[in-house]
Every structure is written in structure tokens, then in C-alpha cells.
Image (tube, rainbow, N blue to C red):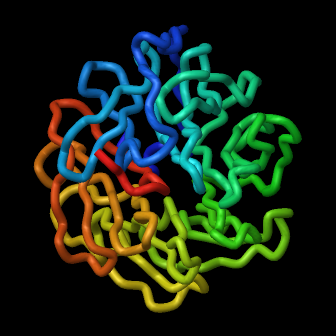
Amino acid sequence: MLCGRAFIGSFLGGTAVFALSAAAAPALPPSGIADLVFQSARTGSSDIYLGNVDGKIVQRLTSDNAFDGTPAWSAGSGTQIVFESRRDGNTEVYVMRFDGLQQRRLTRNRAFDGYPAWSRDGASLTFESSRNGNVEVYVMKADGTRQRRLTRNRAFDGYPAWSPGGKKIAFTSTRSGNAEIYVMSTSGAAVTRLTDSPGFDGFAVWSPDGTKIAFDSSRGGNADVYVMNAEGSGVTRLTTAAGFDGYPSWSRDGKRIAFTSTRDGNAEVYVMNAGGSGQQRVTQSPGFDGHPSWSPIPATG
């Protein structure tokens, strides 16, 4: 759950579930409803929640016995949230409205489809899939149509993230024998390696202005959050606490980063300034809280 290093090449099944009813997820304003969307196992099963940086839980969006996780908030008006779920027996990509309504499945095959990410205009999604025997990066339209494979090799290629300009996709690959961060065009061409370290480098996310990439790395012997320039230079370590720090997400203005940390003995969501200062805990529960994604609209409540 916590570590992408252990997840590479490992896929789990699940059980059937039911979507939230209108009564369970009342209508909310189309934007400004929360700071973050994240996954949490606080009730026993992993579900998707909305929360604020002050620790207040705004709303639970999914409610079932299967795994729901790795949510990503759409850009612009923030009306859609994409996520992965095992509710139909294997991991697939789903999308729902900002308030948890209209949950629908976008991918349909017997392999693993997951870790979805939005394009800046909200028209497309990139995701990883093992449908061709090993994990590769794919793209599709936001309605699930025109699914297309971008990477083709025998290594793991996954954890994709779209650039703000819409012309590049960053991803993690083991093609060099070690997990490193690469970038490519949205056609799958012009693949360029950005990192080169003896540890795991992965889960890259672009800053809103496209000049920086945050990621997690074990190059220092411990999993921590790092940031680098978009072309791979200027690598800077942001966290130094014991335990796992990873799965970063930039705030809409690029001034803060949300991330997952086990520094207090359990996986929780934290936020910090983009330079690494001001690290503070957001969630507190006995279950896993993590994989935060920042809302594109400032919270109003």
C-alpha cells in the first residue's frame, strides 16, 4: 500500500460493491467544497474522502467493501474525480462527480488498470495497465473511449502524470534495471530519462506552472519527497523524517505540497510549503490515509 517499490508487478483482486445513493451524498456546490481528496481505510475498507488542510473531513465519497483509491481531482472547475477500484473483481479506472454521485467505470478488462491522472483540460486521462502482460502507460478520453498504449517494453512503466502544458507525460520505469523517472510526448515518442539514482524514483507530479516536478525517492536510504526542475536538474530533498514520505501533490497555486507520511507510526496525509518548510499533519485515523490530490478550487467552507 505505502510503497510503490513493492507494488511494481503486484496486482490484487476485490469484491463487488455498490455506489453511493443520492441520500448518502447530498448535492454540493460544483467547486470550493474541500482542499483535498484522498483515500482512507479508517472504516476498515479503503474509500475516497474529501477533507481540508485543517483536518476536517468534509465528506466520504465512496462506501463499499472493495478497494477504492488513488483519486485525482480534475482541473478547472473540479467537477470530476477519477480513481481506481476493485469493486468489479479486479482493479479498473472509475470516475465520479465531485460529490460522489454518478460513479461509472471507464476501463473493462481482466487485467489491472489503475493510477489514473487527468490532462490539464480535463478531456483525457493517462493510466497504467497490465492488459498486455506487463504494466504500460496508456491514455484515453475522459469518457473511457479511444484507449491507446503509449509505452512498449518488457519493464514496468507506470505512475503517469500529465504536464500542465498537455504535451508531455512523466512516468516511472524500470527499463534501466532500476525505477527511475522518465518523460515522453503524449504520443509515446521522445522518451527522456530524468533521474539516475541507486534508489527508487517515482510518483512524479508536475507543478502547476510546469517548471518543477515533485517525486518520492529512496536515494537517501529512506523514502522521502524530492523536487527537481522539469528537465531533471536541481534535485532537492524536501523531507527527512523517519518512515515513508511520498505520493506528493501540488496545491493549485504551487505554493504547497500534500503528501503521505508514516512518521507518526501510521500513514497520514501531511502538507508542507513547496520548499519543504512548515510540515504539518492533516489527517489522524487508525487506518491508511494517503494519496492526496489537491482541489483546483480554493475551499470556501
| Residue drawn at 30 percent across, 52 percent down | 260
| Residue drawn at 58 percent across, 30 percent down | 96
| Residue drawn at 55 percent across, 83 percent down | 211
Examine the image and state in which quarter residue 275 appears: bottom left
Q: Position of residue 104 (x, y in %)?
A: 65, 23
Would you place residue 66 above or below residue 203 in this image? above
Compared across the picture, whether 46 is left or right of 245 comes to right
Inspect this view and state whether residue 173 appears: no
Q: Nearer the viewer, residue 161 or 193?
A: 161
Q: Nearer the viewer, residue 276 or 222?
A: 276
Compared across the picture, whether 236 is left or right of 98 comes to left
Would you place residue 88 above or below residue 136 in this image? above
Compared across the picture, whether 39 is left or right of 131 comes to left
Count of marks overlaid on the render: 0
| Residue drawn at 33 percent across, 49 percent down | 300
- Quadrant of the rendering where the C terminus is positioned: top left
Inspect this view and state whether residue 234 appears: yes
- Quadrant of the rendering where the N terminus is positioned: top left
Q: Position of residue 147 (x, y in %)?
A: 84, 41
Q: Position of residue 137 (x, y in %)?
A: 72, 51
Q: Nearer the viewer, residue 40 or 129?
A: 40
Q: Position of residue 299 (x, y in %)?
A: 35, 51
Compared across the picture, whether 83 is left or right of 281 comes to right
Residue furthest left as drawn: 264
Examine the image and state in which quarter residue 97 appears: top right
Residue furthest bottom as drawn: 234
Examine the image and state in which quarter residue 57 appears: top left
